[in-house]
Amino acid sequence: MKIVNDIGLPQYSSRESRVLEILAGRSYVTKVLVDGKEMCCKSGDDWEFHAMEREFDCLRKVAISDLKDSLRVPRLLGLVTSAETGKIIGLLEE
Amino acid sequence: MERVPVDWQAAQWGSGRGDGIFITIFYHSKRFHASLLPPSTPDTIEGPLISRFDATADEDIEAIQHEIEKLVYEAGKSIWDQLARPLTDEEKPSDLHSLLYPESFRFLFTTNDGKAELITDGNEEDVFPTKALA
């Protein structure tokens, strides 16, 4: 996935992300417990990466804009990396 | 014919005109890839299935998908019992990695003596641990 973490988001391994609930698809949108906090996780296989890249791009733009506190969009909370490859495979949001 | 369990899910389907049918099945936290390839001999079960699948319009695809699901499930009955036994709540993996990348196995759907069977598609040893069937 072509995501550059230039806004200092914390990264968590896929092994340390505990799935509490599958919200949509087989694993694409899940409620996870990471670092003691419940978050929404978007992850999946290669064919879903393009959608995640677009979503990250949009949320990143909001996160670094002056309007970040007034726009009602989910906040990026972190990134999920593959426990095997270390590559980014998912987004963590509010 | 035995009913296909509700949690035996043929979740992803792929096909190319004349290339065959490729199904990804999830069952008891395991992933199975089953391929139906165009046969080189006549009188197979998979040959007419592939032709009919290719000729079916998208809006009518569910009926033949159900038919194929039943045949694949039935052909692999001993495999599901052996490789994908039901897990207790304690045994079910809860981490995201296991959900995204479950243990995976590859099979070919073929006809042997007029009967459908699943045989291992063993080119990927890391994907299909043959010892599991020993």
Image: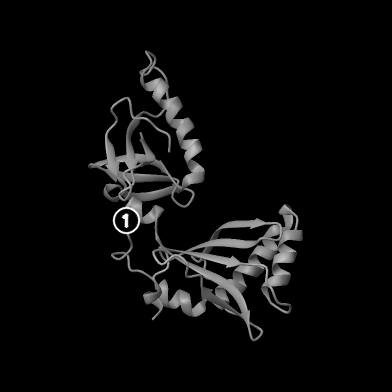
Where is A74 relative to B130, above or below?
above
Q: Residue furthest top?
A: A66
The answer to whether B30 appears left or right of B9 in the picture is: left
Q: Residues within 10 Å of mark 1 (few under 14, many from 20)?
A: some
Q: Quadrant of residue B130?
A: bottom left
Q: Is residue A67 above or below residue B90?
A: above
| B17 to A51, vertically: above or below | below
Please name whichever residue, B6 or A61, is drawn nearer the observer in this view of the structure: A61
In the rendered image, the quadrant that contains the C terminus of chain B is bottom left
Quarter of the rendering occupied by the N terminus of chain B:
bottom right
Q: Which residue is mark 1?
A: B94
Q: Quadrant of residue B103?
A: bottom left
Q: Residue at x 47, y 76 (%)?
A: B79
**Residue B127: percent from the left, percent from the top?**
42, 64
Apparent side of residue B58 relative to residue A71 in the rendered image (left or right): right
Chain of the residue displaying label 1: B
Residue at the image position 68 percent from the left and 76 percent from the top: B45
- Please state the horizontal and vertical placement of residue B25, each as a whole percent of the image: 51, 63
Horizontal arrangement in the rendering, residue B20 relative to residue A8 (left or right): right
Which residue does the image show at 39% across and 55% down from the upper left?
Answer: B101
Q: Give the image location of residue B40, x and y in percent.
A: 69, 73
Q: Secondary structure at mark 1?
A: loop
Q: Is residue B118 above or below residue A20?
A: below
> Front-most of B80 and B129?
B129
Give the colour scheme shown: one colour
Q: Is residue B17 left or right of residue A64?
A: right
Q: Identify which residue is drawn at 27% across, 34% down.
A: A10
Q: Residue furthest left?
A: A36
The three-letter amino acid code for the residue at tag 1 is Ser
